[in-house]
Image (cartoon, rainbow, N blue to C red):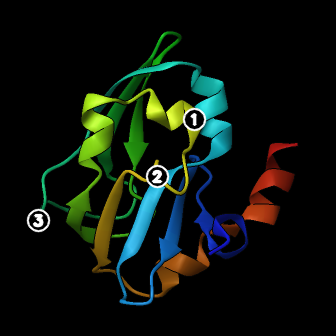
Amino acid sequence: MNFKEEMLCSKSHEYVLKEDNGTCIIGLTDYAIEQLGDIVFLELPAVDDEFSQGDTFANIESVKAASEIYMPISGKVAEINEELIDAPEKLNEDCYENGWLIKVKPTGSEDEFAELLSYTDYKEELE
């Protein structure tokens, strides 16, 4: 799976990747991680928590800043990446394959996906 070709990005630097089973992987883009610097703390929601597109679903802290992480699509949390809670610094090494934050079952309309950018378009917006 090539994350960067298939994922969609929000303007607030979260990504979404649809899995074959309908679940969506959500995480932070490499740009967001670079801007934050060394990650020292991550707070994730509980399984079965529900969020609307744009809601804050997590908090992250680095040596430079604290930030909220926003839901790029509406969904119900199906799984959280437990490994990152104990070792948030792993995000600095890999924010895609092993550094995803949560997996959700989408609850919104397909229109929410249409509002997101391809990774290529996202990178162009940053320039």
Q: Residues within 10 Å of mark 1 (few under 14, many from 20)?
A: few
Q: Is residue 58 above or below residue 41?
A: below
Query: Label 3, label 2: how many angstroms apart (C-alpha)?
Result: 21 Å
Frontmost residue, 29 versus 71: 29
Kind of residue at disc 2: Asn
Residue drawn at x 49%, y 10% is: 63
**Mark 3 or 2 closer to N-term?**
3
Residue drawn at x 43%, y 53% is: 100
Query: Label 3, label 1: how many angstroms apart (C-alpha)?
Result: 28 Å
**Mark 1 or 2 closer to N-term?**
1
Query: Label 1, label 2: how many angstroms apart (C-alpha)?
Result: 9 Å
Residue 120 is left or right of residue 9, and the answer is right
Q: Residues within 10 Å of mark 3 (few under 14, many from 20)?
A: few
Residue 2 is left or right of residue 74, and the answer is right
Q: Is residue 68 above or below residue 54?
A: above
Circle 2: element type: loop
Q: Position of residue 115 (x, y in %)?
A: 59, 72
Circle 1: element type: helix
Residue ID for mark 2:
98
Residue 117's image quarter?
A: bottom right
Residue ID for mark 3:
48
